Image: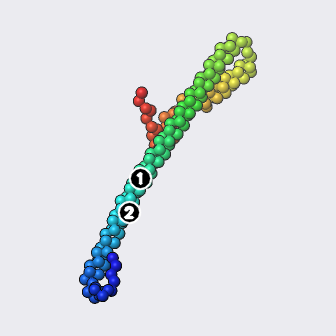
Amino acid sequence: MRWQDTDEATLEKQVTEIVVGVLVAGEMQYRAGIRRQHDWRIERKRELEEEARKAAREAAERERRRKLEIQRRRHEELVAQVRAWSRAAEIRRFVDAVRAATDLLPLDADARAERNAWLQWALSVAGRIDPLEGDDLPKLWAHRSSSRPPALPAE
């Protein structure tokens, strides 16, 4: 839009056309700005939604890993408990075998007392490592974290 002062059309005679042109140009710019703002809002909303989805995926992955770690630790603890229980049972069997083998021996009172003290000591070792003895029995199923472990997948 260009207006010029000419012999045939002075600027004074073009004032209406100029005003209409300026108003139309202003309206076009206003609408283009509104459209840009609208497009920006739509894009920003899409970005925020994607960021929220990403954060949710990351949180779910962290939770999955946390639960797997709990499950792994519980598995390791179970295996350790079974090993300790088996060792305690082996010690008790060994104590029984020593008792049976030495019951028939002609031991004097001091030797028998020494053997009995050793048998008691060996049984106390078995009792200390046995997860099924003492007040520690509830620890077998007590969870070591603030949340319950994940359920095993159905097969």
Towards the viewer: 79 or 16:
16
Left or right? Give the position of 134 relative to 15.
right
Most distant residue in the front direction: 7
Kindly state the secondary structure of the residue where label 2 is placed.
Answer: helix
Asked whether residue 79 is in view, the answer is yes
Is residue 13 shown above or below 79? below
Is residue 132 shown above or below 143? above
Towards the viewer: 135 or 84:
84
Is residue 61 shown above or below 32? above
Q: What residue lies at 33% left-to-right and 86% top-to-bottom?
A: 5
Type of the residue with mark 1: Glu
Could you tell me residue 30's position as x and y percent? 32, 72
Is residue 35 shown above or below 58? below
Could you tell me residue 88's position as x and y percent? 61, 25
Spatial CA distance of label 2 from label 1 is: 15 Å
Left or right? Give the position of 64 relative to 40.
right
User: Mark 1 packing: few (<14 Cα in 10 Å), some, or many (20+)?
Assistant: few
Q: Quadrant of residue 83?
A: top right
Kindly state the secondary structure of the residue where label 1 is placed.
Answer: helix
Q: Quadrant of the C terminus?
A: top left
Type of the residue with mark 2: Trp
Question: Which callout, 2 or 1, points to the residue nearer the camera?
Answer: 2
Name which of mark 2 and mark 1 comes first in the sequence.
2
Residue matched to label 2? 40
Residue matched to label 1? 50
Question: How is colour applied across the structure in the image?
Answer: rainbow
Could you tell me residue 117's position as x and y percent? 69, 25
Q: What residue lies at 41% left-to-right and 53% top-to-bottom?
A: 50
